[in-house]
Image (cartoon, rainbow, N blue to C red):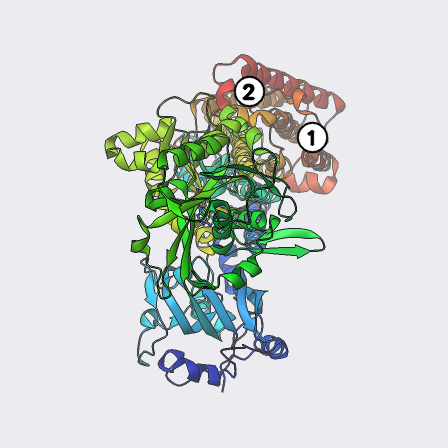
């Protein structure tokens, strides 16, 4: 019987006795009724998709929900509340007890909903970064969403990709997989198609690729043997129930703060109780008062405010095309001090057009824009260029077209490049003079290839020639090709000496205009000549240079400027030529127009620096050219050693270590490999540098909003605790009852405080220096503000309470007035907390609609509390008159004025932001 999956009614195909790894590849192919040449037919694939279900992991089971709900109660502050609720129940204070339990419940539900929302948002974001799989169906290679892979599919994978399903390898070349997601083993393991014994443990089954693991090298074809929940990853997923960490440095700090606060509050409550009893007061009542103190002083809304603010930050960033993969990134983004960014594709469009060609015979201008192969090549006098002759220009173009893996594609009259844009540009310039890729391939069929990598900085191909010989074509970085060339091609097709200095000077001149320059070369070979990398050095015949334009992105310069204003250093890290990098950097405002020594460093400079001097050198330089991906890791480490918070971009497999090491790893959503995305904290869906800048400003916004909430909530809590403390110490009647305190806490936290999470980002948020991540939660400025506002509240409430009593009001009325005063002052103070630096008037009253709705709802709540008989009974309140309301508003205005003065002139008030 086939096993049932827990996800639904789908059946998995029966696995063979000893496992797929113990069978030969062709047996597995037979077993799964597929075909190594043609794959499944479309009909069969569709039928299997219905039978076995989509290739997705089931979402976390219901157990997770209960656990998440229970987790809401796991908080020392809540323990105190529950204990208080139980004791008041025993004391037969039923209303207080019911209100306390009500608060605990509301709190848990709000926390639960917020957390679910945050998780759902993260899940949705993950879905935005969709992965595709390449499969062979009906004899053709197809790209399908990885959800559609079915058992029996022939899947093609290569370095940089994530394995979409469990695959039994059929063919593999140089394959290495990073299986840490599954086994925890971080070193890549070698994989091939060889049969292994049935008893081999999972981690050693070298002929299986596991779903969710990453390929760090090689290429392969495999048959999907298990999909979705049936994969090894699916099994593990079921075991751990998909637990996810939502902790961030701030939530950790807050948790520590709550523990401290609990101890302090319990201590104060105990002292209050002891003092009350010592004065001979009723133990029951004193206890209730002590509970009121504890309950009032606990900032119940804090955890919910944190999750909701972070969740809002995540969705705001997603709207600006930055997808957060790990929640702490939201926060860390806000304190970024250095952004290290790639050039090609991030600061530039990555849309290349060859504009100039250079050979030792001359310089040639290319006309036409974009990828459409229209335009031509002219010499310096405007005459037609000698592309038909067997000289260097023709061979340079042939190398560009023949030594090339990209494809030009026309759809509805629009031309696009499939593959590397640098190569696309070279195809286009060839096609402009009739050297079309398919014709070149027919004329010079390719027999071997050394693919391009960033480390090699060149690509070489071996071709058969009609005359029976062979030829090697090479293109790559100028320095590399010139170094390996022993001669240059002459106009008549013969070889002559190479003037390396002239070539390098020409390349430098072109690069200084911001053009990306690649050199080409060739080498005739005998009929059986092979392509051996080591033999290329010194034997190449230089043919020419291709200089291409890659325009800077429209928004990049402004984003760089904004970063600089915000105290964030921007460093360009590129594999490109020093002069090209310098020119582009100057155009983007990354460099002064006349860069000084040390502003620009090359990979070679970095390698030569002693480790001790590295941090200072790296701090000073803004452009790093000809840097290899391995050096990116050293750069990140050097910057971190210098105390910086580093964001680093990357797209390739080799960038993963640097992305992981950086405080914020930023992967490219379009051009990035799965390996890079997996290692990153943030994925840019548009690959644009400006998006990083937006994400940083949103990150700062999140932190500012959290600070606003804390600045708002702590004074209420402190004041509520203090009012009770003072009453007990003085031995007078409580101006506010415990149940009333709970009313204030809960309603204001939800209706007033939480609306601060929706506060729009302040425009000048990018005018300040980055926040120091080591900054404590309670800064001096914040403590001063909390003390000031809570003192004003306590004095105001006491004064009003006494005034009302003196004026003949009942105790219930005086208390109702005090409660309304508390809430009114908190509502006024809310407007002040909307900005940490600016006065509320300058923000625009209606720029946060939620806040207005919240204030109105709170006002209705207060009217109900004051005038509805049922509420009067429940909370022991009583209707108050118009004059009392005038006094309340008067005090609220006075308090607001004092806070505004402190904000404007106070030594500490201004430093809150
Ligand atoms: P960045 O690191 O900003 O993305 P980059 O794209 O220039 O810059 P690499 O892709 O590492 O960085 O390229 C390094 C150098 O290798 C280039 O400057 C170019 O001279 C050469 N090069 C780039 N692409 C190819 C290619 N497809 N074939 C041959 N050589 C190439």
Disc 2 packing (10 Å; few <14; some 14–19; many ≥20): many
Local SS, label 1: loop
Q: Position of residue 853 (x, y in %)?
A: 71, 36
Q: Dot 1 surroundings within 10 Å: few (below 14), some, or many (20 or more)?
A: few
Work out whether mark 1 precedes mark 2 in sequence or the reverse, and give the earlier one: 2
Residue 214 picture quarter: bottom left
Residue 202: x and y in percent read: 35, 72
Label ID, residue 847: 1
What is the distance, in whole Å, between disc 1 and disc 2 at their CAs? Answer: 28 Å
Q: Residue furthest front?
A: 492
Q: Nearer the viewer, residue 284 or 633?
A: 633
User: Circle 2 — which element?
Assistant: helix
User: Contact (CB < 8 A) between labels 1 and 2?
Assistant: no
Identify the residue at the far top of this view.
Answer: 905
Q: Is residue 476 visible?
A: yes
Ligand 1 shows up in the quarter that is top left
Q: Does 154 sit above or below residue 252?
A: below
- Most extreme residue toward the bottom is 1
- Residue 269 as seen in the image, left or right of residue 802: left
Q: Nearer the viewer, mark 1 or mark 2?
A: 1
Residue 792 image label: 2
Q: How many marks?
A: 2
x, y percentage for residue 484? 33, 46
Q: Nearer the viewer, residue 712 or 426?
A: 426
Give the x, y percent position of residue 426: 53, 48
* Front position in the image: 80 or 496: 496
Ligand 1 closer than 8 Å to label 2 CB: no
Which residue does the image show at 51% across and 49% down from the upper left?
Answer: 394
The residue located at (53%, 58%) in the rendering is 440
């Amino acid at each position: 019987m086939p096993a049932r999956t827990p996800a639904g009614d789908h059946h998995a195909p029966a696995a063979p006795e000893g496992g797929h790894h113990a069978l030969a590849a062709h047996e597995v192919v037979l077993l799964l009724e597929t075909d190594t040449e043609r794959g499944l037919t479309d009909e069969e694939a569709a039928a299997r998709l219905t039978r076995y279900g989509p290739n997705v992991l089931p979402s976390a089971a219901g157990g997770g929900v209960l656990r998440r709900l229970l987790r809401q109660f796991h908080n020392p502050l809540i323990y105190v509340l529950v204990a208080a609720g139980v004791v008041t129940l025993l004391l037969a204070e039923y209303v207080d007890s019911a209100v306390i339990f009500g608060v605990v419940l509301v709190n848990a539900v709000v926390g639960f909903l917020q957390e679910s929302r945050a998780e759902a948002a993260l899940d949705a974001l993950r879905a935005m970064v969709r992965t595709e799989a390449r499969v062979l169906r009906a004899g053709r290679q197809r790209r399908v969403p990885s959800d559609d892979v079915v058992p029996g599919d022939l899947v093609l994978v290569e370095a940089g990709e994530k394995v979409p399903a469990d695959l039994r390898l059929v063919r593999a070349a140089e394959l290495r997989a990073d299986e840490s997601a599954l086994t925890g083993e971080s070193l890549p393991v070698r994989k091939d198609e060889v049969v292994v014994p049935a008893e081999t443990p999972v981690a050693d089954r070298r002929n299986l690729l596991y779903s969710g693991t990453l390929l760090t090298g090689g290429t392969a074809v495999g048959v999907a043997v298990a999909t979705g929940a049936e994969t090894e990853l699916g099994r593990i997923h079921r075991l751990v129930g998909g637990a996810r960490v939502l902790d961030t440095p701030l939530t950790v700090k807050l948790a520590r703060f709550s523990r401290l606060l609990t101890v302090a509050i319990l201590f104060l409550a105990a002292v209050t109780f002891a003092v009350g009893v010592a004065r001979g007061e009723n133990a029951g009542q004193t206890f209730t008062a002590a509970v009121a103190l504890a309950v009032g002083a606990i900032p119940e809304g804090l955890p919910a405010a944190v999750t909701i603010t972070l969740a809002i930050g995540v969705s705001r960033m997603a709207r600006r095309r930055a997808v957060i993969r790990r929640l702490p990134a939201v926060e860390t983004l806000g304190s970024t001090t250095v952004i290290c960014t790639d050039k090609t594709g991030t600061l530039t469009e990555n849309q290349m057009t060859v504009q100039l060609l250079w050979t030792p015979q001359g310089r040639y201008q290319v006309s036409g824009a974009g990828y459409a192969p229209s335009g031509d090549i002219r010499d310096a006098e405007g005459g037609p260029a000698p592309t038909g002759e067997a000289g260097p220009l023709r061979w340079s173009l042939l190398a560009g077209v023949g030594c090339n893996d990209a494809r030009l594609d026309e759809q509805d009259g629009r031309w696009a490049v499939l593959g590397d844009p640098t190569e696309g540009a070279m195809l286009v310039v060839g096609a402009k003079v009739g050297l079309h890729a398919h014709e070149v391939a027919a004329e010079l069929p390719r027999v071997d290839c050394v693919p391009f990598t960033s480390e090699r900085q060149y690509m070489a191909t071996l071709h058969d020639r009609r005359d029976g010989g062979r030829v090697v074509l090479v293109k790559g970085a100028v320095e590399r090709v010139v170094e390996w060339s022993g001669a240059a091609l002459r106009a008549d097709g013969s070889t002559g000496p190479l003037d390396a200095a002239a070539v390098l000077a020409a390349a430098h001149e072109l690069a200084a205009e911001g053009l990306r320059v690649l050199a080409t070369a060739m080498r005739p070979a005998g009929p059986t000549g092979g392509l051996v990398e080591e033999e290329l050095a010194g034997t190449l015949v230089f043919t020419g240079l291709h200089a291409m334009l890659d325009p800077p992105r429209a928004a990049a310069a402004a984003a760089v400027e904004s970063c600089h204003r915000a105290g964030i250093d921007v460093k360009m890290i590129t594999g490109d030529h020093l002069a090209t990098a310098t020119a582009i950097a100057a155009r983007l405002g990354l460099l002064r127009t006349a860069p000084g020594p040390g502003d620009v460093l090359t990979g070679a400079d970095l390698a030569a620096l002693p480790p001790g001097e590295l941090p200072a050198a790296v701090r000073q330089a803004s452009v790093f050219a000809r840097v290899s991906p391995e050096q990116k890791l050293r750069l990140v480490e050097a910057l971190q050693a210098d105390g910086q918070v580093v964001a680093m971009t990357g797209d390739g497999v080799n960038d993963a270590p640097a992305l992981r090491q950086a405080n914020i790893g930023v992967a490219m959503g379009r051009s990035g490999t799965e390996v890079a995305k997996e290692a990153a904290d943030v994925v840019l869906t548009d690959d644009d540098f400006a998006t990083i800048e937006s994400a940083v400003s949103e990150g700062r916004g999140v932190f500012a909003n959290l600070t606003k909430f804390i600045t708002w909530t702590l004074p209420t809590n402190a004041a509520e605790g203090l009012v009770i403390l003072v009453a007990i110490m003085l031995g007078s009647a409580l101006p506010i009852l415990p149940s009333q305190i709970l009313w204030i806490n809960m309603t204001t936290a939800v209706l007033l405080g939480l609306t601060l999470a929706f506060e729009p980002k302040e425009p000048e948020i990018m005018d300040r220096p980055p926040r120091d991540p080591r900054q404590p939660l309670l800064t001096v400025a914040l403590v001063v503000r909390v003390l000031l506002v809570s003192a004003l509240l306590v004095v105001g409430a006491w004064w009003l309470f006494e005034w009302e009593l003196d004026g003949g009001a009942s105790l219930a009325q005086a208390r109702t007035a005090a409660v309304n005063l508390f809430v009114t002052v908190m509502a006024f103070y809310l407007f002040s907390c909307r900005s940490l630096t600016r006065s509320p008037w300058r923000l625009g009253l209606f720029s946060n609609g939620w806040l207005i709705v919240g204030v109105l709802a709170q006002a209705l709540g207060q009217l109900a509390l004051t005038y509805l008989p049922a509420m009067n009974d429940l909370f022991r309140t009583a209707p108050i008159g118009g004059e009392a309301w005038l006094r309340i508003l008067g005090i609220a205005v006075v308090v607001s004025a004092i806070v505004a003065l402190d904000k404007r002139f106070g030594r500490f008030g201004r430093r809150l932001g």
